[in-house]
Image (cartoon, coloured by chain):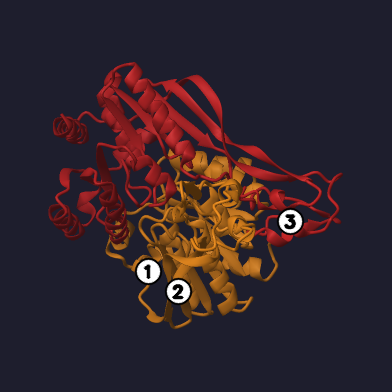
Amino acid sequence: MISGKGGTGKTSLTASFAMLGGEDVVVADCDVDAADMHLLLKPEIHKSEDFFSGQTAKIDQNLCNQCGKCAEVCRFDAIPFEDEKYIVSPLDCEGCGYCSLICPTEAITMEDQNVGKWNVSKTKAGNTLVHARLNIGAENSGKLVAKVKNEAKRIAEQDKLDWILVDGSPGVGCPVVSSLAGASFVILVTEPTVSGIHDLIRVYKLVKKFNIRAGCIINKYDLNIEKTKEILDFLKEEKIVHLANLPYDESFVEAMSQGETIVEYDDGELNAILTKSWDTIKQILN
Amino acid sequence: MKIAIASGKGGTGKTTLSTNLSTLIAETHEVVLSDLDVEEPNSGLFIKGLLLHREDKFKMIPEWVEDKCTLCGECQNNCNYHAVLQLGPMIMVFPELCHSCYACSELCPEDALPMVPYKIGELKHFKKGNLSFVESRLDIGEEQAVPLIAQTNKFIDEHFSEDVIKIYDAPPGTSCPVIEATKKVDFVILVTEPTPFGLHDLQLAVETMRELKKEFGVVVNRYGIGNDDVLSYCERESIPVIAKIPNSREIAVLYSRGSLIYPEIPEFKEQLMKVKEYIFNIKEGVLI
């Protein structure tokens, strides 16, 4: 599930499909920057591990002769001279290791960076959720996303489950590329706004590069019927399956405020539309 | 004077606030709005100005010069990103993995890997009255937003004087693109919604800003939905709540069309004025 634009309802919808899929699915929250799925699925954590990716330079002040070569070669301005010494600014350091390669006194070492944690949990829907938390300011190179997704895949294979639901992040950069890699089907969640359409078109260009079949859910379709028509035209042109139109409905927020998915909170129209969409998705992939 | 508009969660109203605020300030002052959400830049959909300038943006990557190369393998050993690989009798460069650190190039004993520009996106500069609008967009398929954000910041620093008010529409999240977009600003406005997702991601954004040692305040958007947890959190943490933008379907409809909100909705303008005043107070040193 991806959207290009943030806040279109990816997580609420993924959580609903997770409820509908129950024990048949493994859920992967790949929006490791701002992971919210746990707020709806109330997971009980069974396993939690640190994740290391990339490196940061560290200067041993006892060995440093203050020649300044490290600061000179650093393209990221990550080695300022402060209080009479060269120090590494961890938020600026990109871990290239150039400084450590040229330091004449071997005062610089590269240390593996703990960028976050990943967890395996059981949710209230009875399925397994793999989720992660990226440390503040850590590089979201897509590697933690890949870890979450691969762990979900491993669990699905081990438990002989056919479905993995991946909640992606907004944008078109490395975390999104990492969420898309290996998917059999992409669900695009959009809204009928100028931003929603603009971002849908951009992110679909990325999907096309991966050659993955796609379906689309238009959230808040009745907010702007004209824009909804524009989206429908786009879907037709690109042969994207139109999965559903969801109305502008404050139940989304009300459900969230109660820590519930929409299919738990609502037993009327929204529930019916989402149940039908989930069945359609399963049919397409079977 | 540099103000970033950021949020942990996407879709909370960063672009709505950035575009409306910049246009309102431009009624009386010179202002620059810069869209640093280079993966999905949207501000330009709301601001139609005159295109003054357009340029391609590049990052530097190594290019293999076969004739000079002795296949010693140093470059491959020196690259921490696996962006340079030796495959049999050739050196392969993977541009999307390269961070432009220059290690492979400058440490090559034969000068066989000179750095060359590689296109990652484009920058446009528009003008409409007092408002300058600078937008960068990443080419689809390019994965690294950070170099393009850094170059956009550089463009702004080189083209506008210090005392011009600069508003930066930041990307969502809490990782490297947000750090790059906010690290040099004077103040950060975090936009959130009064919902559990909004609160959770606000807490992450607050941690990020504290890590960066930034001054920041909160604007609550869609005020009236959800619950009061965001407000009590701000109070507990002594975070200033600068404005509360009411939840309204009318605002959502205007937004969907690509229209500015404050000329149409007085309640919105009232809150926007609070943000403007807050910024001017900071500028005049009243608050910091």
Q: Is residue B103 above or below residue A245?
A: below
Tell me the subunit letter for badge 1: B
Kindly indicate whether the residue at mark 1 contacts the one at mark 2 (C-beta within 8 angstroms). Answer: yes
Residue B60 place in picture, x, y as percent: 52, 64
| Dot 2 alpha-carbon crowd within 10 angstroms: few under 14, some 14 to 19, many 20 or more | many
> Residue at label 2?
B133
Q: Which amino acid, by three-letter code, is at mark 1?
A: Gly
| Dot 3 alpha-carbon crowd within 10 angstroms: few under 14, some 14 to 19, many 20 or more | many
Kindly indicate whether the residue at mark 3 contacts the one at mark 1 (C-beta within 8 angstroms). Answer: no
| Dot 1 alpha-carbon crowd within 10 angstroms: few under 14, some 14 to 19, many 20 or more | many
Residues flagged by tags 2 and 1 on a common chain: yes
Chain A on-screen colour: red
**Secondary structure type for disc 3:** helix
Residue A231 place in picture, x, y as percent: 19, 55
> Residue at label 3?
A70
Tell me the subunit letter for badge 3: A
Supply the letter of whichever chain is orange.
Answer: B
Residue B44 marker: 1
Residue A47 place in picture, x, y as percent: 50, 20
**Residue at figure coordinates x 55%, y 46% from the top left:** A139
Residue A243 place in picture, x, y as percent: 17, 41
